[in-house]
Every structure is written in C-alpha cells, then in structure tokens.
C-alpha cells in the first residue's frame, strides 16, 4: 500500500474535514452554550442527582475498572470525573480475564441517591447467579471512599428510592418494585409486586427505571421499545400519589435527533433555582451512546422533555455561566504519581505490572503473563473516543520489549483497529491490523480472534537506532461519515505517515462489548513475561 507522508502542517490541510470540526468544537465551547449531544462520547444509562449547587452523574462502564464513574458539574456543560464507586469487582476470575471475560457485562445502570447526609449507589452486574447479585454502596461524599453496604438478589436496571419518611424501595425490571428494610440489607417480605403491565406492542423490556417524587407525586421513568407502525423508541413515565394505588402512564419524550434515530433512557433533575432538565442517551454507532440535555416543562403534572415541539434542542443555555472548562477525556503527561481519574483499565488491572514512579514522567506497562491476543491482555488502559471528531497521540519508548511482545495504541472494541509494535527476535515491526473477537454467549470466553494485518513497516530497517515512536488515531463520528478511524505513526512527533486501513469503520455491537470505541494503550507478552514499555504522554490534538 502506498504511504502518504505528512508533515504536521500538511496534515492540518489534508485532513481539513477533521481538523476544521475540531476548530468548530472549540468555537462551540467558547460560545458558552451547550451544543447537543451534551457529552458526545459513550456515557450510557445515566442517573443524575443534585446536591447543593452540584450535579452528580453515574454511568455504565461494564468491564472497565475502576467502575461506576461519578461525574460532577456545576453548569450541566462542563463535566469531570471525580471518583469511582469501586476499584475492582472480585466475584469471579472472569473479572481478571481468566476463565472467561466480562465483556459487555459487569456493572450496569447504577442508581445514585443522596439521603440522610450520605451518598448511596445501587448496581447489579448483568450476570447470572451470585455474580449478578445487587450491590449497595455508600459514601460520605461523591468522590468517595465508597464502601459496600449490602448484597441483595439481582435487580435488573434498578433504581434506589427513599420516600419522604426514609422508607427505601427498589424499582426494577419492567414495572416491578419492592420495599427494602430500613437498614437496606434485605427485602421486606411480601412487598414484591408489579405496579404496571406493559402494553401489547411494547414487546421489548421497559427498563432503565429512574424514580423521583415531586409535589407529592411519584414518577417512574423508563425507556419503552415499541414495534407498532409509526411508533418509536421513547421515554415513558408512570405516576401515582399512592405507591400501592393505580399508576397513570404518559409518553414524555419521543424525538429523533441530529440525524440519528429516536432516543430515551435517563432521568430528570432540578436546579437550585427550580428549573428542570432531562438527560437522555442516544445510540450513535461506533462512538457509543451519547448524552443529550433537554428542558423539562411540567404540563398537567407531567415532566415533558424537549422544546415546545417535544424535540431535543440543538443548543441549550448552561445552568450557570463562567464555570471553568472541564472534560471527561483528558490529555496526560503522566507526571503524577497517581493515575488520573479519566483512565480506566480493561477488566481488573494487575497492580504490580504498571507504575508511574519507576520512571517519573512516564507510564510503565509491564508484561505479567503470556497471553495469545489483545482481548486477553491485562492492563490495557483506555479512554473514550469522542465526537464529532477526535485525535489521540501516544509516545512510546519500546526499547525494553522482549521477543514476542506486542505493544501499541488502538481504537478498541469488539472490532478493533490497532497499531501494534511487535518484537520478533531482534527485529521490531509496526503493523496496522484489523482485529475481531468472537465470544461465547455464557462465559464471554474468547473463542476466536481474527487478526488481519493490513500494512506493516520494519522499524529496525527504517530507523535502526530508534527507541521511541509516536502513534496517532483520528476518529470521525460525524453523521454520515461512517464512524471512521485513521492511523498514523511518526519517528519524531512532527512528520506523520498514514498506515493501514483508510477510514476503518468503528462498530458498536451490543452482543459483545456493548460500548463505544476507546482509545487504548496496550502491552502484552506472547512468549515470555518481563518486558515493558514506557509511555511518555497521551495527547489530544
């Protein structure tokens, strides 16, 4: 394949569609408004609460660790990750990429509440048996530390709810609820019941329950999947003044948005000044499930989402002005002795196989055990790719790799576009490959990996004295651009060579990873453990 060599200045010209939109994003940030999607990255199953002047949100990250990220914002525009509800899950060796995996499973749809001076979180891994038992965590502040308060039976896509008198309930599944004991360590006998029955054309689950109480009325919000002609994915709401009484139903959002199909699942939240906002996610292909912000208009006692036409608006005013810019995806020079909260590991990390202190200013990733492929490699470090466009760069010192080691940078998912540095004897090659994993349905065990090398280059030949390489991935998630990723390398961080597949398509597949594409840094051994790489920086262009 013919290579295109670009200086950085030339790249800005020849990649004009990508970089022009990056500049557009910067202009949008500077105009002070919220441009939907509010978060154009994989932030599914949100729950949002407000405590004082701060909004807190949790989201689903499944097999990534630490898990159940807690994000905070003062203005609903600038969000940052402030903590995680747990560092690891340890119910099974599958969380350690042994005896199977938890791809697409693990932590789902966490519920976040603030009650009696404490934060509470309820989550149930999407697993069968004891692995799927519900966790209830608590913490004195959203940043943590969080501790396990109780384990209960499995509650699918559940929400924890405290009534005015402090009585706790769990709403879950498709219209099910039960009362918990006052200590939140058990279910009150005989309290389990259905509070509604789905309609005939709602053949999918009604899930993602979120419950609030407003002016004496209880509101349960759920996503509804309908298959009748002219009806779409939508957010429905059930309400009652008596938890043991009859519940009424209404559709509170049925809106497409931004060139993609209909959206739903999320919650509503109020501000200190009494305004209400709706936060719902939308499936957007390879980038994942993105978040939108809508006004809430209380009409006839219903929290109706959207503008005057019931549609998600393109632009919203932030709740406050003048807040500092914050992001959930961040560049990193690895100058701290602690890993930034913007990073997550693929499955549980091996703690003694990475370091930020052995070579200050670098992230060291060591090989720890021999594995056959990327999908079983421990200590792969990830951040979300994001839209409408993104460009991530890593600088890697590969001089301490051993024979059989594979290290690099990839657009990580069930289908992965990867830049891999391969050490074979004394030879070092760089390959761009397309990798695709097959997983068993029950154990999510890796049954096969298709690894198709598209283009390679011998670093030993073109730069025999080189110890460092820069790897770059550009993502384009604009509507109609087919979720494209392009791959580059550089020997000096200035002049870039494109390699491999042009406009590689990033794919979202709910049957495997069930997540948006991630920037991922990896290093694994296929022959003998003990090698390592040093990562100098992760940069966002």
Image (tube, grey):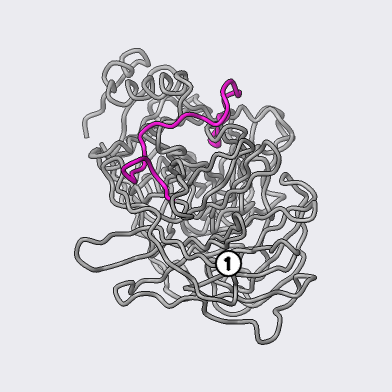
Instruction: State whether residue 48 is above or below residue 52.
Output: below
Q: Residue furthest front?
A: 300
Q: Is residue 504 left or right of residue 37?
A: left
Q: Which quadrant does the N terminus fall into?
A: top left
Which residue is at a point 29% across and 48% down the rendered structure image? 256
Q: Quadrant of residue 164?
A: bottom right
Q: Nearer the viewer, residue 169 or 364?
A: 169
Q: Secondary structure at mark 1?
A: loop
Q: Is residue 263 left or right of residue 367?
A: left
Which residue in the protein does label 1 denote? 241
Q: Nearer the viewer, residue 157 or 438?
A: 157
x and y, in percent, of residue 466 in the image? 49, 25
Asked whether the viewer can see residue 457, the reply is no
Q: Is residue 125 magenta?
A: no
Asked whether the viewer can see residue 350, the reply is yes
Instruction: State whether residue 107 is above or below residue 15.
Output: below
Q: Nearer the viewer, residue 250 or 101?
A: 250
Which residue is at a point 45% across and 68% down the rendered structure image? 248
Which residue is at a point 71% across and 29% down the rendered structure image? 360
Which residue is at a point 45% across and 61% down the rendered structure image? 237
* Magenta-highlighted residues: 304-331
Specify the principal SS of the magenta part: loop
x and y, in percent, of residue 176 in the image? 53, 76
x and y, in percent, of residue 374 in the image? 47, 53
- Neighbour tally class for label 1: few under 14, some 14-19, many 20 plus, Cα within 10 Å: some
Instruction: State whether residue 36 is above or below residue 366.
Output: above
Q: Quadrant of residue 192?
A: bottom right
Q: Is residue 117 left or right of residue 225?
A: right
x and y, in percent, of residue 506 in the image? 33, 46
Q: Nearer the viewer, residue 35 or 496?
A: 35
Q: Which quadrant does the C terminus fall into?
A: top left
């Amino acid at each position: 394949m013919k290579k295109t060599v670009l200086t950085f200045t030339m790249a800005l010209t020849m990649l004009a569609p990508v970089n022009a939109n990056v500049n557009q994003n910067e202009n949008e940030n500077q105009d002070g408004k919220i441009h939907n999607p509010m978060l154009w990255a994989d932030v599914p199953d949100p729950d949002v609460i407000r405590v004082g002047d701060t909004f807190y949100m949790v989201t689903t990250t499944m097999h990534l660790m630490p898990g159940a990220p807690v994000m905070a914002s003062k203005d609903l525009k600038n969000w940052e990750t402030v903590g995680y509800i747990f560092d690891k899950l340890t119910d099974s060796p599958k969380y350690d990429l042994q005896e199977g995996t938890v791809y697409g499973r693990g932590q789902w749809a966490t519920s976040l509440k603030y009650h009696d001076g404490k934060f509470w979180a309820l989550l149930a891994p999407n697993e069968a048996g004891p692995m799927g038992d519900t966790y209830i965590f608590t913490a004195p502040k959203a940043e943590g530390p969080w501790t396990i308060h109780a384990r209960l039976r499995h509650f699918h896509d559940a929400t924890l709810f405290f009534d005015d008198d402090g009585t706790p309930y769990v709403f879950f599944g498709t219209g099910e609820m039960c009362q918990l004991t006052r200590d939140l360590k058990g279910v009150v006998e005989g309290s389990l019941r259905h509070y509604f029955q789905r309609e005939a054309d709602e053949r999918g689950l009604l899930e993602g329950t979120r419950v609030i109480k407003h002016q004496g009325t209880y509101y349960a919000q759920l996503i509804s999947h309908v298959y009748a002609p002219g009806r779409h994915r939508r957010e429905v709401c059930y309400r009652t003044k008596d938890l043991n009484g009859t519940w009424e139903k209404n559709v509170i959002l049925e809106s497409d948005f931004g060139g993609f199909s209909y959206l739903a699942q999320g919650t509503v939240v109020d501000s200190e000044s009494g305004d209400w906002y709706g936060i719902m996610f939308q499936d957007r292909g390879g980038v994942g499930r993105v978040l939108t912000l809508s006004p809430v208009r209380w009409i006839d006692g219903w929290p109706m989402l959207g503008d005057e036409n019931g549609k998600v608006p393109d632009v919203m005013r932030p709740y406050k002005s003048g807040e500092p810019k914050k992001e959930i995806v961040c560049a990193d020079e690895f100058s701290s002795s602690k890993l930034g909260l913007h990073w997550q590991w693929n499955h549980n990390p091996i703690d003694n196989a990475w370091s930020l202190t052995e070579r200050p200013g670098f992230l060291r990733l060591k090989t720890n055990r021999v594995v056959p492929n990327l999908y079983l490699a421990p200590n792969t470090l990830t951040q979300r790719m994001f839209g409408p466009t993104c460009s991530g760069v890593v600088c890697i010192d590969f001089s301490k790799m051993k024979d059989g080691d594979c290290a690099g940078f990839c657009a990580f998912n069930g289908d992965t576009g990867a830049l891999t540095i391969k050490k074979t004897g004394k030879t070092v090659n760089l390959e761009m490959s397309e990798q695709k994993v097959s997983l068993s349905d029950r154990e999510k065990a890796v049954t096969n990996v298709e690894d198709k090398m598209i283009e390679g280059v011998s670093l030993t030949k073109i730069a025999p004295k080189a110890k460092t390489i820069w790897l770059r991935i550009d993502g384009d998630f604009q509507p109609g651009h087919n979720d494209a990723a392009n791959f580059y390398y550089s020997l000096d961080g200035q002049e870039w060579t494109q390699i491999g597949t042009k406009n590689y398509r990033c794919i979202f597949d709910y049957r495997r990873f069930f997540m948006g594409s991630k920037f991922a840094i990896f290093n694994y051994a296929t022959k003998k453990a003990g090698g390592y790489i040093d990562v100098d920086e992760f940069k966002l262009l």
